[in-house]
Image (spheres, rainbow, N blue to C red):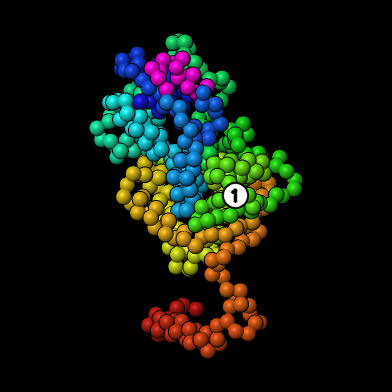
Amino acid sequence: MLAYSGGLDTTAALHWLKRTRGLKVVAVALNMGQGEDLDEVAQRAIEAGADSVHAMDRRRTFVKQYCFKALRAGARYEGAYYLSAALSRPLIATELVSRAREEGARFVAHGAPSKGNDQFRFECSVAALDPEIKCIAPMREWELKSRDEVIAYLKRNNLPVKKLGDTAYSSDRNLWGVRSSAGELEDPAQPAPEYVYQITTNPADAPDNPEAIEIRFQGGEPVALNGEKLEPVDLVERVQKIAGAHGVGRFDTVEDRILGFKSREVYEAPAAHVLHIAHEELERLTLDHEMIEFKPGLAARYAKLVYDSQWFTKLRESLDAFFRESQEFVTGTVKLQLFKGGVQVLGRHSEFSIFDREATRRQAEGGIPAASVAGYLELRRLNQLTHSFKQRPRM
């Protein structure tokens, strides 16, 4: 079972597995919103020699069971990456193992490079799901050392090659965003060429008028856009289109990879960025101080688990249970304004809001009694007095 994207590496890997390993190869191609016709991908696999192809639409599963879990958690790796590719790998591995069991396959294979993160995500996931199934990683075994060599291999064997430009960077796209790296992006001192960006407009070229949108959440999950209830895939697609047109969701960053070295990455995540901002703002209205203060540490840990190929672990499952419980009252609407790459919160409302308007009004009667304030103040002051007597601060 080969995780087949239809790109250069997996097409070459398919042929290599048959010719070098002598294996029967079944290609598994999933639609997760990468913007490519799945029928064309399947046809490319057949032309490359696949014995059969499983082509499946898994967009809803991806959004509901992976992306929205990360959204509830507030997961964002090192402050810039919404984990679009990382979240998709456990789902791909699940499908590979499922199909392998159905057809009695002994091996699963992938086209992840030898220095990349995805080899860990695929192979750790497969090991967790079925330790009897072995993984093959052609890019760790073959002698093709560069993109040019892979292209030459494809042409030499009359294999289908997607239309190529003069670019050398690689990218991965799905409904939750686009990841681009390597090639002309390797030097972090140089700006990313504009042609790298696939789903976002250059903020300088975005509309000159801002656009306001309203997102409704139910139990921490987005369910409606501008008053219209939508299915998860439709909602994410619409937010992506609107936010992308305004240049929202571009991130150019240097991050720490699993193998320990740093990598320059360029991300586009217009839908994820907008939904995370709206979700966090609604949490500020509905969660208490203790939860607001405690949750970010767990969010960072969750993001690292996803990034580091630890999806199928008890810790990730336990954190999901915590985040699911935390979202019971995260219901309401958030209004946002999109303009030239920026996102501004205009307002928020929830039937479960714990914001007490009367208690915050300085001139209004009622609220917290003055005597109660004085007592609380005296307790705080006593703490400072005790500290000062023992360890007087320098003036």
Residue 286 seen in the figure: yes
* Residue at numbered disc 1: 229
Q: Is residue 389 above or below residue 118?
A: below
Residue 143 seen in the figure: no
Residue 63 in the image, given as x and y percentages of width and height: 49, 43
**Tally of numbered discs:** 1
Residue 56 in the image, given as x and y percentages of width and height: 46, 30
Q: Amino acid at mark 1?
A: Lys
In the picture, the quarter occupied by the N terminus is top left
Q: Residue furthest bottom?
A: 371
Between 157 and 94, the residue placed more toward the observer is: 94
> In the rendered structure, does residue 48 fall within the stretch colored magenta?
yes
**Residue count near mark 1 (Cα–Cα under 10 Å), binned few <14, some 14–19, many ≥20:** some
Q: Secondary structure at mark 1?
A: strand
Residue at image location 44% in from the left, 60% down from the top = 326
Q: Residue furthest left?
A: 132
Q: Is residue 271 above or below residue 93?
A: below
- In the picture provided, is 136 more to the left or to the right than 298? left
Residue at image location 71% in from the left, 40% down from the top = 205
Between 290 and 205, the residue placed more toward the observer is: 290
Between 65 and 276, the residue placed more toward the observer is: 65
Residue at image location 48% in from the left, 33% down from the top = 57
Residue extent of the magenta highlight: 40-53
> In the rendered structure, does residue 145 fall within the stretch colored magenta?
no
Between 147 and 12, the residue placed more toward the observer is: 12
Res 312 → quadrant:
top left
